[in-house]
Amino acid sequence: MDFNLTNDQIRRREQAAEFARTELSTDVITRDHAGEFSRDLWKKCADFGFLGLCVPNQYGGSALSLLDTILTLEGLGYGSRDHGIAYGVNAQIWSVVECLVRFGTEQQKQRYLPGICGGELIGCYAMTEPDSGSDCFSLHASADKSKDGYVLNGTKQLVTFAPIADFALIFAKTDLTAGRWGVSTFIVDREIDGYLAAPVQHKMGLRTIPIGEIVLQDCSIPEQQRLGPEGSGASVFNTSQETERSCILASQLGAMQYQLEQTIEFARKRKQFGKSIGKFQSVSNRIVDMKLRLETSRLLLYKTAWLREQGDPNMLEAALTNLYLAECYVQSSLDAIRVRGGRGYLTENEIERDMRDSIAAPLYGGTSDIQRDIVARLLGL
């Protein structure tokens, strides 16, 4: 693995950071407090090219490599103080777009990918249900065969973008007797009769991206809206989840870099007992730990992307990356507050929002507990 980045890679990351700093970092306190999603900012992200980073050129994307995509999203996280929109971009890319690119028919790709890349369409990825979370294939949503296609029924929850999405990737059972091999995936448009998107649910962090439920009541869809062969839902899910685990925290890596730099600056300037607080070992050690977490997280993330680009198995590395980076982000966010003391607790200084936003990282893409189970299983335990 070559750790040297090309000039183009460095330039692309810096351009992403500059765009995010100038275009996405205004009025974040207000929008966070209101739980407001900005379509205008989303369109700006699309116009910059974030939503089509790894989409083939013929569908409006840039067709970047996995590592180039990660580096660009790292720049997004570094420059943007709105971690909600950075998370939303990652969720769109690694869940919705990844599935369409890998499993979609040519007709499906032509219908949805250009709209996503251009910011006109937003999709959501609906697997979790009230009674199936980590045990994802115990879902109850059903897709019964009909004369013209399928009739879908069920409830999905904790779905990013559900309240505003133009379409949803729905996982439902087409064969109740086949276990995980009886699950299929469907593209369901919002305007279909029987599709109900519940109102936005309020949450602790990442408030500028909406989350909610989808209720399906006798939704009739044609067969050509199935994504992949019937019974391939487990393959669709596992493939997208492996990529998501590998990459969805790329922007958090950039956020950790910014967080570290700002904490160092504060520790140098803030004086107590006649000297900078960074001269106190208890403070400096905490900042050293932040640096260590950042660098080891970066190595894991880049290695995981590199392995995938080589076509090598990376399920173990993907789980380790998701687990480690998520928990490092939480701990470093807490350390950033502790270095600042009471100031870090105030909303106006925008540090406490990092802490609130970071708490979601060990939950989405599979909880840290599930990542540990995956690693243990792959180690033969």
Image (spheres, rainbow, N blue to C red):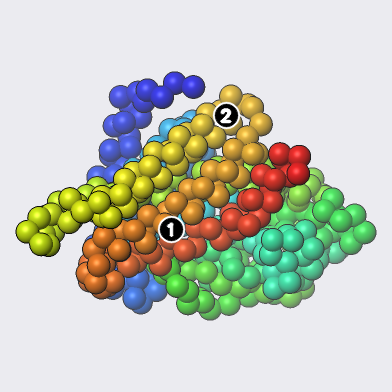
In which quarter of the view is residue 8 placed? top left
Name the residue beneath numbered marker 2.
Answer: 307
The residue under label 1 is 330
- The disc, 2 or 1, on the residue closer to the chain's N-terminal end is 2
* Count of number-bearing discs: 2
> Residue 55: x, y in percent?
51, 38
**Residue 62 image position (x, y, % from top left):** 44, 35
Query: Residue 123's x, y, as percent?
Result: 55, 57
Few, some or many C-alpha atoms within 10 Å of disc 2 (few <14, some 14-19, many ≥20)? some
The amino acid beneath tag 1 is Val
Identify the residue shown where x is 37% and y is 23%: 4
Quadrant housing the C terminus: top right
Depicted 122 relative to depicted 294: above or below? below
Q: Which mark is residue 54?
A: none
Residue 348 vertical position relative to residue 313 in the rendered view, above or below: below
Mark toward the viewer: 2 or 1: 1
Residue 40 visible from this viewpoint: no
**Residue occupying the far right of the picture:** 177
Q: Secondary structure at mark 2?
A: helix
- SS at badge 1: helix
Residue 373 left/right relative to 67: right
| Residue drawn where x is 44% and y is 21% of the image | 2
Q: What is the crowding at mark 1: few (fewer than 14 residues within 10 Å), some, or many (at least 20)?
A: many
Left or right: 125 with respect to 79? Answer: right
Report the front residue among 224 and 17: 17
Q: Amino acid at mark 2?
A: Leu
Query: Residue 315, percent across and down?
Result: 65, 39
